[in-house]
Structure formats: C-alpha cells, structure tokens
Image: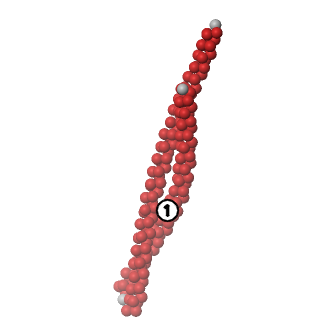
Amino acid sequence: AECMAKYNEQQEAYQQCITRNNKYKTDERALDAEINRLQSEIDELQERIDQHQSIADALDQCNNNKQTLLNDLKQCQDKNEELKKKNCGEYINKIDELEHDLGECNVEWGFCQQEGRQKDALDKKRIEEINDQRNKFDLCNKQLKEYKQKAKANKK
C-alpha cells in the first residue's frame, strides 16, 4: 500500500510535468509565430524606408538641378546687363526665356522641398516604429529563451 501511494504520488508529479511541458511547447509556438510576424513588419518598414530614400535621392537631384539653373541665370543676367548696354533685343528675349524657365524650376523646387519635409516626417515615424517593433521582438525572444530554459530544466 505504501509503494502504491508513492507510485501514485510520482505518477501525479509526472503528469504535472507533462502538462507544464505541453504548455511551454504551446507558448513557444505562439512566441515563434509572434517573432515571425514582427520580423515581417520590420522587413516591411525597412522597405518603406528604402522607398523614402529614393525620394531623398530625387530631392538631391532636384537641388543639383536648381543650383545649375541658378548658375545659368547668373551668367544670363550678367550677359543681359552687357547686352542692354549694346541694346540687343535677340539676347534680351533669350534672357526672358531663361528667367521663365527659372520660375518653373522654382515651382519644382518648392514641390521637392515639400516632398523632402514629408519624407523626413515619415522617416522619423518609421524609425520610431522599427524601434518599437525591435523592442517587442527582443521581449519575445527573451520570453522564448526563458520558456526554453524552463522547459529544459523541467525535463531534467
């Protein structure tokens, strides 16, 4: 009878270990799924940042184009002053044309600046989102490691 009681007691302890082990496995699968989901979100956010970098590159190109046009305008203005002294109508028309082109460039420049500000705001938001996701990812990894260690300890 004493042996049977001891056997039943050990059997009950064994069943509790099995139950805890099954729970750890279920928790581990849930954490693995969460880790995969978070990694997908991080990948998606990185892709968005890459897209915003393309916008930043386009803005840089726009800035370079503006500077080139400003340099051209300065040369034209200098020539305009020279030609006004000579009273050459043909060159004055060319200068007017270039000034018109510069006006159009200034409109494009304004658009590029607005796009740049929007990109900067989005980049900041995405970086914050990535950091939030990274923190969640780290927490999940930590919990998973703890569950695995507990599961390993319970197996012994």
Residue 60: give x, y in percent of width and height. Answer: 44, 66
Residue sticking out furthest to the front: 2
Between residue 71 and residue 3, name the one nearer to us.
3
Residue in the foreground of this view, choosing between 17 and 86 = 17
Q: Nearer the viewer, residue 88 or 139?
A: 139
Q: Height in image: 153 above or below 9?
A: below
Query: Quarter of the image holding residue 61?
Result: bottom left
| Left or right, 95 with reference to 42 | left
Question: Against 69, is 1 above or below?
Answer: above
In the rendered image, the quadrant that contains the C terminus is: top right
Is residue 96 among the parts visible in the rendering?
no
Residue farthest toward the bottom in the current orientation of the protein:
85
Residue 3 placement: quadrant: top right
Measured as percent of width and height from the top left, residue 94 is found at 37, 81
x, y percent for residue 149: 54, 33
Q: Residue at x 63, y 11 (%)?
A: 5
Element type where label 1 sits in the image:
helix
> In the figure, 153 relative to 112: above or below?
above
At horizontal 36% and vertical 89% (from top left) the residue drawn is 88
- Percent coordinates x, y for residue 78 in the rendering: 41, 85
What is the three-letter code of the residue carrying label 1?
Answer: Glu
Evaluate whether residue 82 shows in this view.
yes
Quarter placement of the N terminus: top right
Q: Residue at x 54, y 37 (%)?
A: 145
Residue behind mark 1: 115
Q: Is residue 52 above or below residue 87?
A: above
